Every structure is written in C-alpha cells, then in structure tokens.
C-alpha cells in the first residue's frame, strides 16, 4: 500500500535559509517558464525544455535536475487549465527526486540547495521509521508556518489477511460521527461545538478584512483542519483495533450522495459539508488494510429504516434522529446502532465474495 508520510525537517538557521532561497528561486523560475509557455502556447514538458533549459539554468542558477523539475511543475499545472497564465507562489511546494534527494539514514537526508547539498535531520509523526527501500519516487518539499516538511511516498506491506469470523458494522453520521454494531458511538457533539466556534470567529475576521485578520483566519482554518483530522484518526484507529481484537471484517456503507440522502434539520445538513466523512472512511480503510482486515462495502439504502430484528422496513420506523421503533415487531433501539447492525448483517452475506476476490 502506498502512503504519504509527512516528515518534519530539523534545520538550523543556515539550512533553513538555504532551503527557502532554493524554493523561492525555483518558483521564480516557474513563473518565467509559465509566461513563456502561455505566450507561445507550448505546454509540453519536452517542448518547454527544448526552448528554455539552458536559459533557466543560467538565469536562475539551477542545477540540471532542478531545472527539469521546475519545467515539469509548470507543464503539470497546464494539464489542468490553459485559460490563463499560471502564477506560482514563492513558497509553493517543489518536487525532489532521487537525483537531488537521498536518504542517509532513517533520521537524516541529503538534499540539494542552490548552495550545494546539505544534510538535514527528519522527524515523523505516527508512522514507523522509513526504510530506504520502501521510499517510492519523488517527494514534495513544502513550507508551512516557517517549517519545512517532506511529503514522502512509501510502500508499506499489507498485513497477512485474517479470516474473519464475523462482521463489525459501522454507521457514519452527524450527531454521532460513527456508531458500530456493538453499540459503541463516537459523538459529534464536541466536533459540532468546535466547528460552530470557529465559524463565528472566521465570520468576524472575514468582515474585518485587514492583513492581520486574514493571517489570523488562515491560522484558525489550519487549526480546525488539524482537529478534524486528529478526530478521524482516533476514531478510525479504535474501530480497526476493535475489529482486529475480535477477528471481524469491517462493513461500511457507500457515502456517495450523503448530502442528498440526509433527512435531518437544515443546521445539521450544513454541518455535513463541514465534516470530512470521506476522510474518516479512507482512514478506516487504509488502517484496516495495514492490519489485514477485510472491508466490505454495503448498499446504504434503508439501513436506517429497516428493523435489525425482523427486517420490516418503513420510513415511520425511525421516529427521529436518535430513536428507532419498529411498527411491526415493536423493537426499539438507538437509530444509529440499529443502522450499524443492518450494515453488518448485509455485509455478512457478501463476506464470502469479498474474501474470494481478496485471494
């Protein structure tokens, strides 16, 4: 499985300045290349390189491979849109490949700057230390809040697939971000309060419109995003660990069209666009794969209206967001727990097919 690992570069002031100078010069070269490409309507990497390679090396002091990477960055950007000339942020990400970036050890890299190579320490977050033979292709150097990071693509081996004896159903929602068929719920109350808090602050800052307000707005947006990501990581980690400890596969419903399917209030509907459901699902899927746990997709239709005991389906079974009461057999339960059980039972039917395809 290919994963992108975000690693922090541990630089002293001299190394920081050299990397920043290199980043700014390469992006300056990208602006120069972009103007030529748009003016002459030449957007292919080979065509641009034929005309500008030696000029940009001399004009901006770039090494051979840095010049190639700058041309490649511009060419890639025009594959998406050719309507206007592209302008590049001075601190926009730049690409390093194996010719200008090498791994000295698990904790140190050698990276090329305009002033030659420097050896820099690196730190990782939740991931294991890198094995050089697992690093795949190029890495992006990014600059954020005065700190350099490398986005490294690594190929991690999948765990030996387990042979599950049952299925753990997971229902994703708003009031409860996730609920399992075991009855475990991960409340979204704190998340909603945090979102509302940030929304009010951002509205005030946007109305002010000053430079300092915009700077503060950017900082707050980043903080909110990190909170969401951390919450999704924690939830997905616990769900996968539960499935692993109980030797079960994980069942997830298809999230496509979630905005159209939701039947709650307008305020709650608006929060759907504010929470990263797809991210939570992706986190569960990749963590499960690394643990050898099969993930079974389930048709989401009527999972919240069907009785998990007798199978009777009716819109009126779900009295409100939180309560489920079957009109046929009288079974009552938390609505999300009932839906998670339906997801699990539907997945159990498809589990043999998923296991065969996995093999």
Image (cartoon, rainbow, N blue to C red):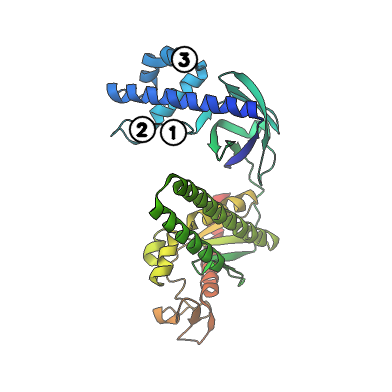
> Tag count in the figure?
3
Q: Which residue is mark 3?
A: 57
- The residue indicated by pointer 2 is 79
User: If you read the primary sequence from the N terminus, does the residue marked by circle 2 or circle 3 appear first?
Assistant: 3
Q: CA distance from mark 2 to mark 3?
A: 24 Å
Nearest to viewer (mark 1 / mark 2)? 1
Image height of 211 relative to 340, above or below: above
- Measuring from the top left, give residue 206's x and y in whole percent: 40, 53
Distance between the alpha carbons at the discs numbered 3 and 1 = 20 Å
Say few, some or many: other residues with alpha carbon within 10 Å of mark 1 (under 14 / 14 to 19 / 20 or more): few
Query: At which x and y percent is residue 295?
Result: 56, 56
The local crowd at label 2, few if under 14, some if 14 to 19, many if 20 or more residues have their Cα within 10 Å, is few
Residue lying at 42% horizontally and 47% vertically, measured from the top left: 210
Q: Quadrant of residue 37?
A: top left
Q: Quadrant of residue 242?
A: bottom right
The residue positioned 54% from the left and 36% from the top of the image is 143
Q: State which tag comes first along the sequence, 3 or 1.
A: 3
- Helix, strand or loop at mark 3: helix
Mark 1, residue position: 89
- Of callouts 1 and 2, which one flags the residue occurring earlier in the amino acid sequence? 2
């Amino acid at each position: 499985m290919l994963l992108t690992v975000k690693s922090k570069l541990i630089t002293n002031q001299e190394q920081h300045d050299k990397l920043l100078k290199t980043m700014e010069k390469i992006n300056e070269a990208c602006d120069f290349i972009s103007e030529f490409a748009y003016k002459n309507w030449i957007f292919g990497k080979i065509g641009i390189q034929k005309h500008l390679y030696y000029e940009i090396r001399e004009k901006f002091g770039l090494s051979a491979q840095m010049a190639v990477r700058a041309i490649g960055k511009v060419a890639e950007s025009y594959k998406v849109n050719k309507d206007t000339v592209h302008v590049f942020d001075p601190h926009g990400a730049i690409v390093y490949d194996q010719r200008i970036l090498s791994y000295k050890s698990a904790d140190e890299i050698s990276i090329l700057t305009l002033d030659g190579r420097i050896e820099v320490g690196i730190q990782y977050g939740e991931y294991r230390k890198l094995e050089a033979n697992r690093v795949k292709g190029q890495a992006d150097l990014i600059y954020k809040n005065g700190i350099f990071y490398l986005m490294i693509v690594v190929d991690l081996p999948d765990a030996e697939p387990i042979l599950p004896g049952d299925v753990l159903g997971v229902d994703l929602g708003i009031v409860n971000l996730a609920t399992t068929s075991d009855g475990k719920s991960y409340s979204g109350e704190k998340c909603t309060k945090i979102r509302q808090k940030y929304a009010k602050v951002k509205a005030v800052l946007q109305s002010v419109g000053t430079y300092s307000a915009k700077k503060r707005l950017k900082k707050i947006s980043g903080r909110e995003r990190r909170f969401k990501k951390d919450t999704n990581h924690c939830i997905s980690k616990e769900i996968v660990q539960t499935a692993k400890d109980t030797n079960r596969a994980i069942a997830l419903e298809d999230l496509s069209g979630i905005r159209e399917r939701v039947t709650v209030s307008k305020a709650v509907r608006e929060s759907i666009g504010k929470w990263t459901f797809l991210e939570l699902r992706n986190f569960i899927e990749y963590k499960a794969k690394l643990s050898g746990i099969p993930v079974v997709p389930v048709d989401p239709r009527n999972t919240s209206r069907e009785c998990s005991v007798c199978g009777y389906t009716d819109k009126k079974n779900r009295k409100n967001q939180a309560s489920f009461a079957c009109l046929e057999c009288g079974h009552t339960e938390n609505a999300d727990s009932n839906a998670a059980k339906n997801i699990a039972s539907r997945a159990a039917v498809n589990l043999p097919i998923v296991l065969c395809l996995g093999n």
